[in-house]
Amino acid sequence: MTRIALPTNEQIPAASRPVVDAVTKQLKMTPNLFRIMALSPNALSGWAGLQGALAKTLDAKLRDGIALAVSQVNGCQYCLSAHSYVASNLANIDDDEIQLNRAGRSGTPKTAAAVAFAKKLIETHGKVGDDDLHAVRAAGFTDANIVEIIALSAQFLLTNFVNNAFDTEIDFPVVDVAID
């Protein structure tokens, strides 16, 4: 059970409305995560600024793969459910690839390098090795791309922590944390 009171639409602070309304329009629902984050307009706008800027980096399928890998490492069932739904329904990623991404792998070598790097980044608290950097560079990522992978991982880490801290009620098709 969620450990925080979810605000109703009427209780969402006015300063949070633009972001919440944009998410609601895109997903045709207001996810519980955004109801919670809306309680702090500054935290929500900080997340939205980072998300908006990073949406211009890499490609959507790769960003979704990183979200899945990071959320798996953090054991965030809410985010795994949400990102699996988005990956499947908005990015048209098949179920096999979603499962691979969650494990830090992919059927595509370049994506495999990025999601493996994101997984290792979170597992090691950012203390990746020279071999990890070499592998992601060898797959064709520039140093700027690596910074973007790190920033995306931090963005997903934020939402993982919010959901794990508050045990957010899942309002997407529920995905088990255990990998098939």
Image (cartoon, grey):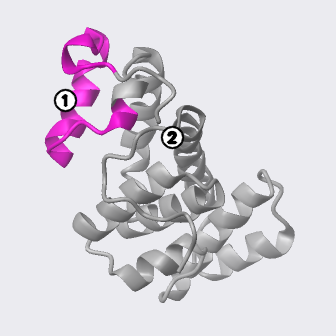
Magenta stretch: includes residue 87: no
Q: Which image quadrant is residue 82 in?
A: bottom left
Residue 78: image location, x then y, percent: 45, 49
Q: Position of residue 165 (x, y in %)?
A: 60, 34
The amino acid marked with disc number 1 is: Asp
Give the mark, 2 or 1, whose residue is nearer the N terminus. 1
Q: Is residue 111 above or below residue 49?
A: below
- Name the one closer to the observer, 76 or 42: 76
Separation of marks 2 and 1 at Cα, in angstroms: 18 Å
Does the magenta run of residues contain 9?
A: yes
Few, some or many residues within 10 Å of mark 2 (<14, 14–19, 20+): some
Where residue 55 sits in the image (x, y, percent)? 37, 50
Q: Residue at x 48, y 87 (%)?
A: 108
Residues shaded magenta: 7-34
Instruction: Give the residue at mark 2.
Output: 159
Label 2 amino acid? Thr
The answer to whether 48 appears left or right of 180 in the picture is left
Q: In terms of depth relative to the viewer, which is nearer, 155 or 166?
A: 166
- Judge from the rendering whether residue 9 lies leftward or rightward of residue 164; answer left or right: left
Element marked by disc 2 = helix
Is residue 107 placed above or below 156 in the rendered structure? below
Q: Which mark is residue 21?
A: 1
Answer whether labels 2 and 1 touch (C-beta < 8 Å).
Answer: no
Q: Residue at x 46, y 58 (%)?
A: 80
Residue 73 picture location, percent across and down: 65, 60
- Residue 40, image quadrant: top left
